[in-house]
Amino acid sequence: MRNLILISVIALNLISCQNSDNIEDIVVIGGGLMGSSTAWELSKYGQNVLLLEQQDSIYTFGSSFGEARISRSLGPKEDIFSFLQQTSVKETKYLIDFLNKGELQELHSMQDIYTTAPVTYIYTQSQLNEVENLLTGQLDKYEYASTKEEADEKFGMKISDTTMVIREYKKYTGTLNPKVLIKKLHLGIIKSGNRVNYNQKVTSLKKEDGIYKIKIIDNKTGTIKTILSKKVVAAAGPYNGILVKDIAPYFSHLISPKRLFLSFLKIKSDKYDMLTSEQKNRLISSYPVAYLNSEIFYSMIEKFDSNQRPLLKVGGHFLRTEIKELDEVWAMQLTEQEIQWSKENTADYLDKLDLPIKSSDLEFDKGYSCVYSLTKSEIPYVTHGLKNITDIDSSFVLVGGMSGIGAKGSLAYGLFAADLILDNKNDSFMYQKAKTALGFQRLMEDIQDIEK
């Protein structure tokens, strides 16, 4: 009888150990820039983390899709977004060093991700106070043309009397390549001994007895399974609201996905080849650009073709439309009006650069529909969720609400999320200022607003 009891105890202990081993420490849901950055930062801290991504290893759709996003640092004194961009640059350097560690030669470089280039900002005279606030005590290198004469002299630009131009010069401002950065983040996660599981679509996220139950369907095999985790980071972009509906339903009211379009334009080859070397250099050095008007036209060079002709990526930050089916929005084609808007605004900017290129000289190469996840203030969240009405759920963090401002600071958002889930402390002034702007206190205020 004693032996039978002993065998039963051993069996129960084995089952208990097996179940414990099957519970993940931390699961990050979403393998785009935010989720990948968070999983990497957790890996950097030596944590056991599993990253789940519904796409394959080749990233084919998402708000960070493509080969160029503007990376800019210029901001007023104590600007949190400048801080996030610079923090992300520092964290990226650490990632590159980690990937090169132990290699016989340097296989990775910052230049794989960043293309340093002047960033051009165009303002109107009605924004003079904003410009003065931006430039007061500014430490980053810049040039400012407050009149059309100065714009012509400094930048070779032809602008109106009501326009002002600022150009920012800083290492690793210009553009960054999301496609390459995501790939390197995954390499860093795997090299740390952690896992990136692709084709894993999370269909349900619940919490029972302090443990998260994550239901997954394998997009390739159709296999359904449930995994358990002690902690979860939700970084699923526009899918966050649906993902966390059972554990944090308020986020579906606080974050609203909207469609935006991106156009990719070419200058007709015969027209581009007619440009002088000076004109081509002026064009290239004048991208990326952000025209801070009511629509916020922005454009950058996505890449160069085999003949070194630029492919221009064009969008409008405030040209947002409703989404009927989130899974289908990525395949939506651009309308003729959206294509025409892209051509006309690009031609207008090229005219400001004093280049002989008209709208009819531009060819539409392709289009892409992406999604911004909008909060009321258009400031993202990196925050714990609620355990009950007022208490913090320290085992859950959401990273979301990226209204087109996530890419440049992606590793910084990941760092904040990792620090939250691990309860790491950082008392520096700018860190705390950013944490307050992104975090739990603001979440509580926003929840109270929707309950009124």
Image (cartoon, rainbow, N blue to C red):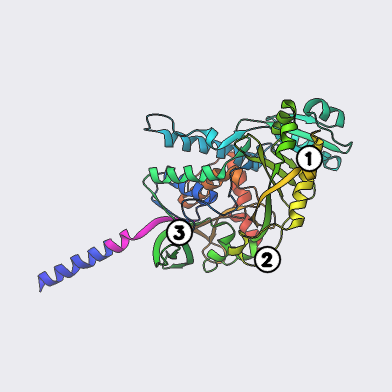
Place of residue 106 in the rendered image (x, y in percent of width and height, measured from the top left): 43, 30
Quarter of image, res 176: top right
Disc 2 residue type?
Answer: Ile
Q: Nearer the viewer, mark 3 or mark 2?
A: 3
Q: Residue at x 37, y 29 (%)?
A: 104
In the rendered image, which residue does mark 1 sit on?
349
Query: Does the CB distance between marks 2 and 1 fall below 8 Å?
Result: no
Disc 3 residue type?
Answer: Asn
Label whose residue precedes the other's in the sequence (2 or 1): 1
Q: Which residues are magenta?
A: 18-29
For label 2, the crowd category at 10 Å Cα-Cα, with few meaning under 14, some 14 to 19 and many 20 or more, is: few
Label whose residue precedes the other's in the sequence (3 or 2): 3
Place of residue 107 in the rendered image (x, y in percent of width and height, measured from the top left): 44, 33
Which residue lies most toward the front here? 270
Q: Check residue 28 for magenta coloring.
A: yes
77 sits left or right of 331 in the view: right
Q: Is residue 280 above or below residue 299?
A: above
Split into 4 quadrants, where in the image is the C terminus? bottom right
Tag of residue 450: 2
